[in-house]
Amino acid sequence: MNTFNKKFSNHLLIIFYGLMMGAINKIPGVSGGIVAIIFGFYEKLILSFSRFDMKSLDILRKEGFKSFYKHINGKFLTLLLFGVIVSFFSTSLIIGYFLENYYSQILGFFCGMIIFSIIIILKKISYINLYNIMFIISGFIIGISFFFISPGNEISNPLFVFFCGIVSVSGMVLPGLSGSMILLALGNYKLLLIDSVNALYYTTIKIITGYRLETLDLANKKLIFLLFVFAFGSIIGLIVFSKILNFLIYKYKNSILSSLSGFISGSIGSVWPWKSVVYDNNIGSLFLKLNNNFFYYPNNLSIENITILTCILVGIFVVYLFEKANVRN
């Protein structure tokens, strides 16, 4: 019974990781991959995705699905992606509300998590030398540069949407490099992460309640088609990026970890809770305003500043607890 309870708890924990990845990845400037760093399963995630190759197909052909599923760490990926998918659809409907009403507090919480995750990564680097410091600085410059890129124009061409899927999935494998921010820069954030997701959600509800497929709105059908093109591109990008990154981690672990710490440090600007910006429930407008406004530090202990500072400390404490739990395990 204890063994069953432990396995069930582990399964729920992996689903929770997926929920967190999906939710965080929807916020511009924050990378879903940072969850893997925070909760200590980053290398396991990259290794699992990198096993989708010709060898795995050969195992599937010769030894069957059970051996293939074990080779790719299928149970872990299934539970994690289940959480990501559930979060992906649910957060597209509710994320606007939380950002509108608790914007600074939510950013404060993420800021605290990111700050402590940088410490975790730096602890994993076996030695710091001038070479690794250069990688940290380079990663920081690249990470922070995404914050100052202006959004492009929306393009619904399927080939471009496929390309968006390939490059935006980097947010899962490169902590600090936000997939949402990349989509904003390419102009397709609202199209692919808000409109298309909501179209699929509402269309599914209509089908369940008795609507026939041919009676559905043509615009929604197009949005759903683009969402599937985007998803296919994301799968291709995920396999390719993880394969490359797994090789680099194996060969140049200290250099990669140094770059990741720089990436994540550069992303702090995107979640800094004290900005002269008013959220107006439009992600694209928010991004433009952030480019035209400045960051500041709290100069008084108002109720708002106290709640933000509390959220930062809570974020730090949550990551600290998970890091301790991972060390024990």
Image (tube, grey):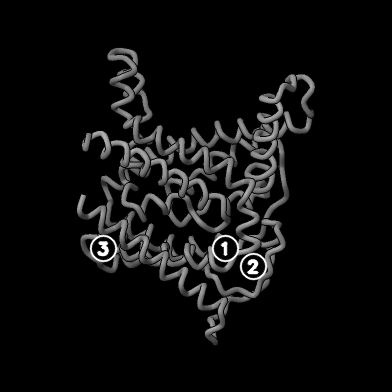
Q: Which residue is mark 1?
A: 147
List x then y, in percent, for residue 147: 57, 63
Is 121 located above or below residue 187 in the figure? below
Disc 2 versus disc 3: distance between alpha carbons?
A: 32 Å
Q: Residue furthest front?
A: 1
Q: Can you tell which mark lies on residue 123?
A: 3
Q: Is residue 276 above or below residue 63?
A: below
Residue 309 lies, in percent from the top left, at 47, 75
Kind of residue at badge 3: Lys
Compared with 213, 262 (above or below) is below
Residue position marked by numbered label 2 in the rendering: 290
Residue 189 to residue 208: above or below? below
Q: CB atoms at circles 1 and 2 under 8 Å apart? A: yes
Q: Position of residue 182 (x, y in %)?
A: 58, 51
Of marks 2 and 3, which one's residue comes earlier in the chain? 3
Q: Nearer the viewer, residue 102 or 265?
A: 102
Q: In 3D space, how far apart are the residues under numbered discs 1 and 2 (Cα atoms)?
A: 9 Å
